[in-house]
Amino acid sequence: MLRRTFPSPEALRRLPFGLADVALILGTLVLLGLIARVGADTLISFVPPDVVPSVSLDPVNLPYYAGRSTLRMFIALFFSTLFTLIYGYIASKNRRAEQVLIPLLDILQSVPVLGFLSITVTGFIALFPGSLLGLEAASIFAIFTSQVWNMTFSFYQSLRTVPPELDEAARLYRLSGWQRFTKLEVPLAMIGLLWNAMMSFGGGWFFVAASEAISVLNRDYTLPGLGSYVAAAIAKEDLPALGWALLTIAVVILF
């Protein structure tokens, strides 16, 4: 009896994609459009004290501010994950590097976020003269320092505690270093890494206000965002605006 090896006529007449694929494509295009719209405003001119960003307490601006803050959070999370994979891998594979990198990581996590911000903000502004991108980079770096340390410790610990039977299986299959990293070590560390990424992302919201209100050379500059909106509402004792901001943060976190 011959087995059918070609698609049936019914399968050939069927559409190559369904409604779920259409929804995914449209959703991706909308997301990319929103990112482009929000991200474009990070490249505007920044020439203090003449041209500086400001924050309006009009609740109509809250969706836009939420987009700016959320974009900063996800960019920081991306760089936190990249740093985690590289730093944790090197520390777990090289004993000499481990003796330096792990104590250094412990020291860095003990430095307050505002300590990093006060040191690095001038350098970031110098990298992008005349552009708001310098302040944006400083803000993202501050959020990065609030997310990255526990993620790196988690990944490092996972690589140091690979079960012996899995390590032996990797040797028997003669996996290369890259294959071992992608097929054994990263999947093994993924649960802990995802959990700590969630905790880091949630904890990052506590530092949004500090990272969006930056002091440079005795001048205060405010980046548009939910954190700066909350800070402005508190400074002006505007309770309705504060309530709208907290509601927006809750909605963003739920999404």
Image (cartoon, rainbow, N blue to C red):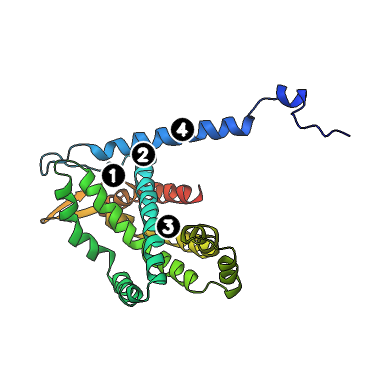
Quarter in which the N terminus is drawn: top right
Give the quarter of the image for residue 107. bottom left
**Nearer the observer, disc 1 or disc 4?**
4
Q: Residue at x 74, y 27 (%)?
A: 11
Q: Secondary structure at mark 4?
A: helix
Q: Secondary structure at mark 2?
A: helix
Give the mark, 4 or 3, whose residue is nearer the N terminus.
4
Q: Label 3 vs label 2: CA separation?
A: 20 Å
Give the mark, 1 or 2, whose residue is nearer the N terminus.
2
- Contact? badges 1 and 2 (CB < 8 Å): yes
Give the mark, 2 or 4, whose residue is nearer the N terminus.
4
Q: Is residue 187 left or right of residue 70?
A: right
Q: Label 4 vs label 3: CA separation?
A: 23 Å
Q: Does residue 237 appear in the picture of this structure?
A: no
What residue is disc 3 on? 201
Give the quarter of the image for residue 46. top left
Give the quarter of the image for residue 41. top left
Judge by depth and name the residue closer to the eye, 46 or 249. 46
What residue is disc 1 on? 224
Q: Position of residue 16 (x, y in %)?
A: 64, 27
**Nearer the observer, disc 1 or disc 3?**
3
What residue is disc 4 on? 30
Q: Amino acid at mark 2?
A: Tyr
Q: Amino acid at mark 3?
A: Phe
Q: Is residue 110 left or right of residue 249?
A: left
Q: Label 1 vs label 4: CA separation?
A: 22 Å
Give the mark, 3 or 2, whose residue is nearer the N terminus.
2
What residue is disc 2 on? 64
